[in-house]
Amino acid sequence: MQVRCPVCGALLVPAHLPSPFNSAMVALSALILIFWIAYEPFMTVSAAGVKATMSLADTAVVLWHGFKILLGFFMCFAVIFPNYVLVVICLVGFFNFKPGLATARAYAFCHRFAMVDVFVLAVAVSLVKLMQLAEVSFHVGFVLMLAFSCLFIWCWMSFRPSRIWNLYKAQQELSAHPGELASVQGIAVCPHCGCQHRPSESGGTCPRCGAASSMRHAMWGQRTMALLIAAAVMFLPANLYPIMVTTYIGSPTGSNIVDGVVSLWGMGSWFVALVVVSASLFIPVFKIISLCYLLVKVTAVGVWRPRALSTLFRIVELIGKWSMIDVFVVIIMSATVRMGNLLTIDPGFAIVAFCLVVMVTMFATSSFDERLIWDIHRRGKGAASNGGLPNGARQC
């Protein structure tokens, strides 16, 4: 039976959850595919009789020789984090593995930052860009990557970190009065593992993961604003400097994000141009402005339409990782277009700044607590000056 919060509408318990064994079967299939994909070619790019073929292994080798920072981003977000999630699911489903504290923490982190779906969309965008430079032919690796992405997304949705935390240590039952704020009843939610507990009884620490626990965190506003300022500062070089440099017959030409969008629009790829401009320009700006707006509403102006503000925050939370499309596009283009002295594509300085913008805005989103909206709506602005509220999980 599906359970939702009667106040904010948040999904608390999904209607159906597949068994650990079924999830492990899908995860094992995905792991088999990723090992097969590693050496299968994705595509071949041909121009003036020169050919270049891309596979995951080739991408790692190219990035290792000149772009180690991008190699780290690529390996973590598209390979290591997703595979860790799949391996843990297999261990739980096939061997009744009981995760420890370190395993549960690592699973929650990897689950959040695994970006296989973003990588696959970046491959599709790269194909459109490559077609204006050379002839592109597809191989079995591209089809297998699409299949792997579907399997992983199913595992990602069906095996949330809360299931791993409950396997590590089951949630204790607490008596509470329905219709009354949990904070009024002295019940807190750990921002790391989601454990519901009473800080007064647990000595100020979470009884499940041992993290410091309190009803509300006093530094939430400063931390969120500091991260937003850092993101805004890095956003300028990310858009002004070249995001990639194309060298054709020894003549280098730098292009930033706007140049890429204009080029796609000019060649008739309007949909792809809209995807790129949305992910690279609209989403980061939207996240920064939205979080600033929420901060102002919660700390200074007051809350009159809490459900609308809560929906806005969840949208910001949902779209956070999709700005990484441009980072993966540059990685794919740099690894694929290697045609000696005829044509090469190299990452520009802006790609590192842009990746940091995406990461910092994601951390800023996690530092803001949605419960602030509802607390201040019910209690008035006086509650905001009484210590702030915690980062992390929602408490309905």
Image (cartoon, helix red, strand yellow):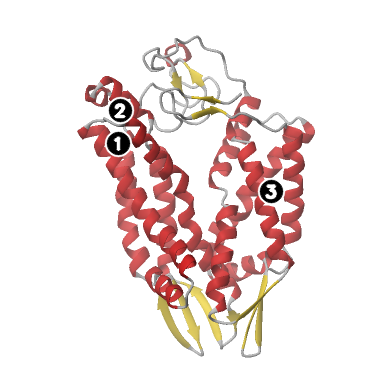
Q: For the residue marked with disc 3, what is the amino acid?
A: Leu
Residue found 59% across the figure and 67% down from its top: 64
Please rate how many residues cluster around mark 1, counting C-alpha atoms within 10 Å: few if below 14, some from 14 to 19, many from 20: many
In this rendering, position of residue 9 left or right of residue 231: right
- Labelled pair 2, 1 in contact (Cβ < 8 Å): yes
Type of amino acid at the residue the image marks with label 1: Gly
> SS class of the residue under badge 2?
loop
Q: Residue at x 52, y 74 (%)?
A: 129
- From the image, state whether disc 2 or disc 3 is nearer to you: 3
Question: Secondary structure beneath disc 3?
Answer: helix
Report the front residue among 209 and 31.
31
Residue picked out by circle 2:
388
Q: Does label 3 or label 1 sit earlier along the sequence?
A: 3
Q: Is residue 159 left or right of residue 383?
A: right
Tell whether 357 sits left or right of 101: left
Q: What residue is rendered at 56% in x and 37% in y?
A: 108
Density class for disc 2 (Cα within 10 Å; few <14, some 14-19, many ≥20) is: some
Q: Which residue is mark 1?
A: 221
Say which label, 2 or 1, has the lower sequence index. 1
Residues at marks 2 and 3, CA–CA distance in whole angstroms: 41 Å
Name the foreground residue: 4 vs 69.
4
Vertical comparison of 127 with 228: above or below = below
Q: Is residue 54 visible?
A: no
Label 3 packing within 10 angstroms: few (<14), some (14-19), many (20+): many
Relative to 86, does residue 307 appear above or below in the rendering?
Answer: above
Residue 1 in the image: x percent, y percent? 61, 23
Q: Which residue is mark 3?
A: 151
Mark 3 to mark 1: distance in Å? 38 Å
